[in-house]
């Protein structure tokens, strides 16, 4: 379980990206963040792995306390947290296997990472590729794979880290609808099999409905909805997607 308590994030340019956000992410669940562009989804995900430090409030991991407690706690939290990015962030000239192996690096000390990784790491990486259906592409260069395959390599890299948590920021935003369902389906299946708590931001409602155990709706930096996909009726969707801009309302009066 990850717990966000009363978190506010104000960036250095003065933009308040999250306002008094409090929410819990139960262990092993697949949770989807919804909201318009600028609602605060990426900011919340960055707080959850400690890339952004809340201006006020805290993020705590079950049994371990604040992830910001000290440098060691933060490194430990990051080691337990896999990341999947919209643009997958693969190294194009490396093979698929080489990219997945980078997911193993955080399990080793700094000096160890300068040496070739042990055979057991290669086995873990190959198994991860196999689970996303890409064992036969292990030795292909990443930049010669399709977009969907590249994102699968990104997922394999995250699971090779053997994480407790996976954070995925719009993991299927650059894929066509059919590939999106397959790739998100892979992530969903693997996380369920391994009991990984997964938090995914999405712009596609139908994917949220299909895969989410629960949904968190953000609007203008506020959490405006927490509940099951079945509760996503028009009133809830209005709350999440109707961008209220007080200054525009004043101008219109
Ligand atoms: N590094 C930053 N510095 C300053 N402001 C930022 C930074 N990152 C985000 N913001 C601002 O914070 C607000 C929330 O942004 P965030 O990226 O969290 O939204 P989002 O919901 O992920 O949007 P999108 O769907 O477009 O990815 C926006 O107003 C954005 O302009
Ligand atoms: Mg974003």
Image: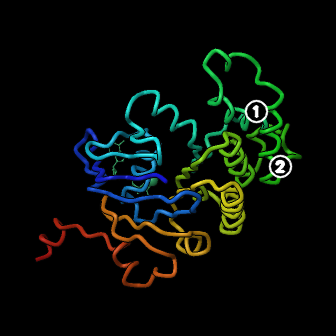
Outermost residue on the right side: it is 136
Q: From the viewer's perspective, is 57 left or right of 49?
A: left
The residue under label 2 is 130
User: What residue lies at 86% left-to-right and 46% top-to-bottom?
Assistant: 135
User: Which of the two marks, 2 or 1, is nearer to us in this view?
Assistant: 2
Q: Residue 72 carries which label?
A: none
User: What residue lies at 73% left-to-right and 31% top-to-bottom?
Assistant: 93
User: What residue lies at 40% left-to-right and 78% top-to-bottom?
Assistant: 237
Quick check: 211 above or below 233?
above
Residue 1 in the image: state x and y as whole percent. 49, 54
Write down the quadrant of residue 227 in the picture: bottom left
Residue 139 in the image: state x and y as whole percent. 85, 37
Quick check: 128 above or below 25?
above
Q: Which mark is residue 98?
A: 1
User: What residue lies at 39% left-to-right and 49% top-to-bottom?
Assistant: 43
> Camera-side residue: 250 or 220?
220
Outermost residue on the front side: it is 63
Residue 60 in the image: state x and y as whole percent. 41, 46
Q: From the viewer's perspective, is 62 left or right of 104?
A: left
- Determine whether the residue tagged by mark 2 lies in a helix, strand or loop: helix
* Image colouring: rainbow
User: Quick check: marks 2 and 1 in contact, CB under 8 Å?
Assistant: no
């Amino acid at each position: 379980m990850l717990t966000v308590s009363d978190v506010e994030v104000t960036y250095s340019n003065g933009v308040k990206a999250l306002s008094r956000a409090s929410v819990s992410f139960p262990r092993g669940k697949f949770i989807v963040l919804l909201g318009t562009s600028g609602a605060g989804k990426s900011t919340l995900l960055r707080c959850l792995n400690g890339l952004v430090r809340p201006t006020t409030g805290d993020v705590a991991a079950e049994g371990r306390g604040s992830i910001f407690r000290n440098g060691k706690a933060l490194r430990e939290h990051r080691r337990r947290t896999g990341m999947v990015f919209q643009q997958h962030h693969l190294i194009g000239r490396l093979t698929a296997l080489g990219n997945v192996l980078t997911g193993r690096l955080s399990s080793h000390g700094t000096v160890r990472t300068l040496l070739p990784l042990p055979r057991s790491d290669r086995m873990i990486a190959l198994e991860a590729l196999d689970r996303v259906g890409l064992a036969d592409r292990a030795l292909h260069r990443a930049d010669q794979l399709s977009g969907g395959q590249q994102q699968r390599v990104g997922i394999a890299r995250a699971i090779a880290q053997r994480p407790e948590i996976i954070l995925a920021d719009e993991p299927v935003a650059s894929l066509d609808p059919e590939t999106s369902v397959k790739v998100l389906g892979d992530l969903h299946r693997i996380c369920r099999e391994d009991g990984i708590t997964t938090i995914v931001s999405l712009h596609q409602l139908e994917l949220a409905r299909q895969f989410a155990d629960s949904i968190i709706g953000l609007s203008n930096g506020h959490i405006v909805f927490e509940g099951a996909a079945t509760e996503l009726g028009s009133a809830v969707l209005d709350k999440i997607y109707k961008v209220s801009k007080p200054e525009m309302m004043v101008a219109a009066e």
